[in-house]
């Protein structure tokens, strides 16, 4: 019988997520009776797919051999030359992925020896994964090309880039009429609904009036501002901050993240990242030609902690991960790591000598009853950790493009050297705005948290009223990450349908994990009434497009 994409979403989402922009993928099946070229992957009933539309039948299941593959992928030499990904997917058994050899190159010889129970994902280079006899290039590897390196930085589905998503081809999927309502862009916060910190523009203007003194700071930022921030950040995180050598001001937290990854990851280095987590983490590791070691976070069915699989994390560290990169609170799920999880991360990082980069962008926006444990306040070597924060979200100062990274003096020094050739410095006049950070008027932050919590609670009511939709209560930050019931259209197509028929923009879950195709992320830092009405339109379309 035929095997449909939706039947094995976890596996096919991984293909779809990474191969959407590629061409000439040959799919087919293989049975145990056929050997040699005739039985090579893709040689039985192959079909050439120009663009993976997620709706085709992807192979056939042979009843006599249920243990054999549901889906085989042959990566041809031409395809390998233009892509950095190679997949070998004999069946939909995700649990077997952990058995993959951590360092063995994927070659014909390896494929002949290995079990057919593996899911192969090698992001740092592309290998010839043909299983049949041929040219004899048993151990040929294809290095990443400049084209493939940048193709992995796709921006069309990234937050704020929805205008680049074309509506062409979606019309045959549409059902019913558009639902009227005020458009809402949940891909980012609304700084009109939640205005910037009081006094921020006045401080910026004073910086402009200061002229060259403020415009041309040292590369890591104005020392007076860094000195002021060091005391405030130390008080907030519970550990000292070295204003002179251990702190850098960057063009946004995104800039800090890029500098931190580039300062710690080079070609072939292994990096443990969480799935799901911030969409740029994966892209930055791939761009630096590192090897990702994914670690599952079972946020949906866990309470009181993030759900990080600590066993997988230790496995990644044991396999040679040099860096662990994660966000806390988690973006997109909005969950907070428990004290026990943070202590376990610290213990494992110390045991395996792993550098930790933690993105704490939303650490100030904690909801009632939620405790937060700062990683840098634990017993971890100060030279093995970098913390990233900024005032762009909770404080609505995103337009000033400001972030900070603090921690390891050696890593901060590398980040400054890289910043010197990328942007020189964070905007000098914008740096002045950091004088307002952690110095808001009394009660201002408490009120902002209450306002966001009220929106969160109302959105949870809307989502939980619909059957089949799963959503965990956001513990911190302004993201909610519902998993939708099974739909009759692909997750990516539903995101486009939402924009066209409901005026609602969300970020597809596959930006954060290849296994989150049925999820969408919403930033609910919006006008309260408009956000609730938009989510009501969203769930109405979920019902309309149910499978």
Image (cartoon, rainbow, N blue to C red):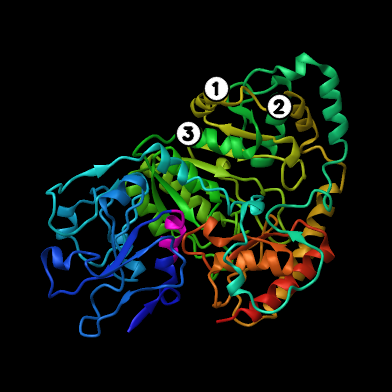
Q: Which of 147/517 is in front?
A: 147
Q: Which image quadrant is residue 117 in?
A: bottom left
Residue 16 colored magenta? yes
Cα distance between the residues tagged 3 and 2: 21 Å
Q: Position of residue 175 (x, y in %)?
A: 65, 78
Q: Is residue 378 visible?
A: no
The residue at which mark 1 appears reads as 421
Task: Examine the rendered structure and indicate whether residue 359 appears above or below residue 173.
Answer: above
Query: Dot 2, crowdedness within 10 Å: few (<14), some or many (≥20)?
Result: many
Whether label 3 touches label 2, CB < 8 Å: no
Q: Which quarter of the figure is the N terminus placed in? A: bottom left
The residue at which mark 3 appears reads as 262
Q: Position of residue 464 (x, y in %)?
A: 68, 77
- The x, y position of residue 107, in whole percent, is 20, 51
The crowding category of the residue bearing disc 3, from other C-alpha atoms within 10 Å (few below 14, some 14 to 19, many at least 20), is many
In-front residue for pair 42/451: 42
At label 1, counting other C-alpha atoms closer than 10 Å, the crowd grade (few under 14, some 14-19, many 20 or more) is: few
Does the stretch in magenta take in 77?
A: no
Measure the C-alpha gap from mark 2 to mark 1. 14 Å
Magenta part of the protein: which range? 13-21
Label 3, label 1: how far apart the Cα atoms are: 13 Å
Residue 251: percent from the left, percent from the top? 65, 32
Circle nearer the N terminus (3, 1): 3
The residue positioned farthest toward the top in the image shown? 212
Q: Residue at x 56, y 48 (%)?
A: 155
The residue at which mark 2 appears reads as 427
Quarter of the image for residue 222 reads top right
Asked if residue 504 shows in the view, the reply is yes
């Amino acid at each position: 019988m035929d095997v449909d994409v939706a039947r094995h979403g976890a596996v096919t989402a991984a293909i779809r997520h990474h191969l959407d922009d590629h061409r000439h993928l040959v799919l087919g099946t293989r049975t145990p009776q056929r050997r040699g070229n005739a039985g090579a992957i893709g040689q039985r009933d192959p079909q050439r797919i120009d663009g993976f539309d997620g709706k085709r039948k992807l192979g056939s299941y042979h009843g006599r051999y249920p243990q054999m593959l549901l889906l085989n992928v042959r990566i041809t030499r031409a395809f390998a030359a233009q892509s950095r990904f190679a997949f070998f997917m004999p069946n939909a058994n995700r649990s077997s992925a952990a058995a993959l050899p951590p360092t063995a190159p994927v070659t014909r010889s390896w494929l002949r020896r290995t079990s057919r129970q593996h899911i192969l994902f090698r992001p740092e280079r592309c290998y010839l994964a043909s299983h049949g006899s041929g040219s004899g290039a048993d151990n040929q590897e294809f290095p990443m090309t400049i084209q493939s390196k940048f193709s992995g930085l796709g921006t069309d589905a990234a937050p704020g880039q929805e205008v680049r998503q074309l509506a062409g081809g979606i019309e045959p999927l549409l059902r019913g009429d558009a639902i009227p309502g005020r458009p809402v862009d949940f891909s980012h916060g609304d700084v009109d609904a939640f205005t910037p910190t009081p006094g921020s523009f006045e401080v910026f203007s004073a910086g402009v009036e200061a002229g060259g003194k403020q415009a041309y700071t040292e590369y890591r930022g104005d020392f007076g501002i860094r000195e002021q921030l060091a005391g405030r950040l130390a008080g907030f995180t519970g550990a000292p901050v070295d204003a002179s050598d251990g702190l850098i001001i960057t063009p946004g937290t995104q800039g800090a993240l890029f500098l931190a990854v580039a300062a710690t990851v080079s070609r072939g280095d292994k990096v443990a990242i969480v799935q799901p987590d911030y969409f740029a983490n994966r892209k930055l590791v791939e761009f630096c030609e590192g090897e990702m070691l994914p670690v599952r976070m079972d946020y949906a069915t866990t309470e009181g902690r993030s759900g990080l699989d600590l066993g997988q994390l230790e496995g990644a560290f044991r396999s040679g991960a040099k860096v662990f990169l994660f966000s806390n609170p988690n973006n997109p799920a909005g969950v907070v790591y428990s004290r026990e999880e943070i202590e376990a991360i610290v213990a494992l990082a110390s045991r395996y000598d792993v550098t930790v980069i933690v993105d704490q962008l939303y650490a100030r926006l904690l909801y009632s009853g939620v405790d937060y444990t700062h990683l840098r306040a634990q017993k971890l070597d100060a030279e093995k950790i970098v913390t990233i924060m900024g005032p762009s979200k909770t404080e609505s100062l995103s337009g000033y493009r400001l972030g900070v990274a603090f921690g390891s003096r050696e890593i901060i020094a590398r980040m400054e050297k890289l910043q010197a050739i990328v942007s020189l410095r964070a905007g000098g006049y914008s740096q002045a705005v950091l004088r307002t950070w952690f110095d808001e008027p009394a009660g201002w932050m408490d009120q902002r948290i209450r306002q966001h919590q009220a929106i969160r609670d109302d959105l949870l009511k809307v989502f939980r009223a619909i059957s089949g939709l799963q959503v965990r209560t956001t513990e911190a930050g302004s993201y909610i990450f519902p998993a939708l019931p099974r739909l009759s259209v692909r997750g990516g197509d539903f995101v486009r349908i939402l924009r066209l028929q409901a005026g609602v923009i969300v970020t597809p879950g596959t930006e954060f994990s290849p296994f989150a195709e049925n999820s969408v992320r919403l930033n609910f830092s919006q006008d309260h009434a408009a956000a609730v009405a938009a989510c009501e339109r969203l769930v109405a379309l979920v019902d309309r497009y149910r499978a």
